[in-house]
């Protein structure tokens, strides 16, 4: 009987520890980087979304979180910390004049824009949440392409 108890002790300890940790919410870090900016003027806005009805957000008002990154040698990156597991999408703006908004010509943006999972955008390839989204369940690093239209 004593031998059976000695054998079961490690399993009981593991069971108790696993049930103790299960009540804690797990959080992850998401690092976003963008390269090949056309210059080092201004800054880069990185907006994080977790709802389809908020994305894309031309006026940067419906985001979950927004960070601003400095530009160093044509690149920028930020890290969103302590995010719960879930589905997210990224929208970036190379805000060359640091006014916090997308400056446009007639129709198209004059400044660089980018969306997670998009290599290009156009009339038949407009950004939508289902295509731009990704599932976060661990610490991640994502590169977003910058597009100058």
Image: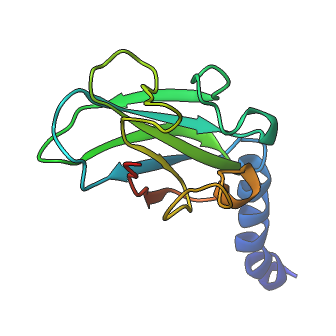
For the N terminus, which image quadrant? bottom right
Q: Position of residue 66 (x, y in %)?
A: 50, 27
Against 137, residue 1 (above or below) is: below
Q: How many marks?
A: 0
Residue at image point 72% right, 62% down: 13
Residue at the left extreme of this rendering: 73
Q: Position of residue 98 (x, y in %)?
A: 30, 19
- Locate residue 60 relative to residue 17 in the image: left or right: left
Say which quarter of the image contains residue 97: top left
Against 125, residue 97 (above or below) is: above
Q: Is residue 19 visible?
A: yes
Q: Is residue 85 visible?
A: no
Query: Is 29 or 8 nearer to us in this picture?
Result: 29
Say which quarter of the image contains residue 9: bottom right
Say which quarter of the image contains residue 15: bottom right
- Locate residue 89 relative to residue 102 in the image: left or right: right
In this picture the colour scheme is: rainbow
Residue at image point 64% right, 29% down: 64
- Locate residue 90 relative to residue 133 in the image: left or right: left
Residue at the right extreme of this rendering: 1
Query: Is 89 or 12 nearer to us in this picture?
Result: 89
Residue at image point 18% right, 31% down: 41
Against 111, residue 29 (above or below) is: below
Q: Position of residue 71 (x, y in %)?
A: 20, 37
Query: Is 20 or 140 nearer to us in this picture?
Result: 140
Residue at image point 35% right, 51% down: 33
Q: Position of residue 2 (x, y in %)?
A: 81, 79
């Amino acid at each position: 009987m004593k031998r059976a108890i000695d054998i079961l002790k490690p399993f009981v300890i593991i069971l108790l520890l696993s049930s103790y940790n299960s009540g804690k919410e797990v959080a992850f870090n998401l690092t976003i980087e963008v390269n090949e900016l056309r210059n080092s003027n201004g800054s880069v806005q990185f907006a994080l979304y977790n709802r389809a009805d908020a994305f894309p957000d031309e006026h940067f008002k419906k985001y979950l979180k927004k960070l601003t990154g400095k530009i160093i040698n044509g690149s920028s990156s930020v890290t969103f910390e302590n995010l719960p597991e879930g589905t997210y999408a990224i929208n970036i703006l190379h805000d060359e004049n640091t006014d916090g908004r997308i400056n446009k010509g007639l129709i198209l943006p004059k400044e660089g824009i980018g969306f997670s999972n998009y290599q290009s955008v156009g009339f038949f390839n407009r950004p939508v949440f289902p295509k731009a989204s990704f599932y976060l369940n661990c610490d991640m690093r994502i590169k977003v392409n910058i597009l100058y239209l």
